[in-house]
Amino acid sequence: MSADASIPRLTRRGFLGLAAVGGAFALSACATVDQGPAYIEPPEDLGPSFGSYVTMYGPMYDEGFEIPAVPIERMDAQFLRQVVRDPTGEPAGTIVVDTSSHFLYLVLGGGQAMRYGVGLGRAGFEWAGRANVQWKQKWPKWTPPKEMIARQPELAKYSEENGGMPPGLDNPLGARALYIFQNGEDTLYRVHGSPEWSSIGKSVSSGCVRLMNQDIIDLYDRVPGQAPILVTSGIGMS
């Protein structure tokens, strides 16, 4: 799905100075296999009220961490953050993950949605339905599951008993994590950041729903606590 062609475009110049706007629980399987996408020339600009892609995906200093720029010239342009006509029909403030297209929508209201590209792993396809963002975490810890440690003994130092992997640029959960609960129960489904920009738009070996760190920070700042989320394979198939 492409961006709404009726939305006027801004020049890079117009918003060059605009910055990307905006635990104990840890996703148990979020390591990925890095696969570089084919080169596709990205669009230069966004719709109203947004800066250029160069600024949006440029380097960031966040909570004491320096997040590197995303090489957008190597990204498939459809997976860059953009405002689109809302295809979901959901109320404003709802997050919709369409696993069939590798898109996450945040419904803005007024017939529009913010669309983000996502990467998916096996866990990203294992749960679907309606739930809520129970809580959010900046720079979360990561704890690999016992099954993963059995396959990769070198990860034992990040076990639950050892306190998990500390937050940081190499942490598979990235800069932010949204923890999804249904009827008060943890679904073990997470929407989180990732340093592996090249996994966006792909299905890799493990993990749930990952966004580029610049995008998860933007989403985190827009999403209130208890925000509703719908995970589906195909819009309109809830």
Image (cartoon, rainbow, N blue to C red):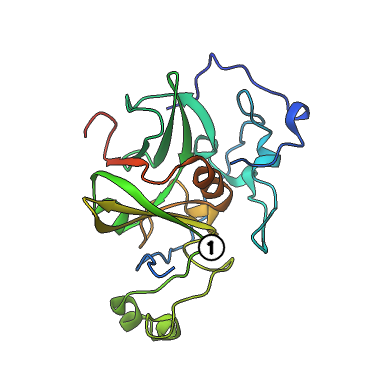
**Is 45 situated left or right of 230 in this image?**
right
Total labels: the figure holds 1
- Give the vertical position of 123 relative to 94 (above or below): below
- Give the vertical position of 160 relative to 76 (above or below): below
Per the image, the residue denoted by label 1 is 139
Given residues 22 and 114, the one toward you in this image is 22
Question: How far from the left and from the top, in percent, is residue 107?
Answer: 42, 30
The C terminus appears in which quarter of the rendering?
Answer: top left
Residue at 70% x, 52% y is 59
Question: How far from the left and from the top, in percent, is residue 103?
Answer: 41, 39
Q: Residues within 10 Å of mark 1 (few under 14, many from 20)?
A: many
Given residues 71 and 83, the one toward you in this image is 83
Outermost residue on the top side: it is: 6
Tell me the SS state at disc 1. Answer: loop
Residue at 61% x, 16% y is 8
Q: For residue 177, which quarter of the picture? A: bottom left
* Disc 1 residue type (three-letter): Trp
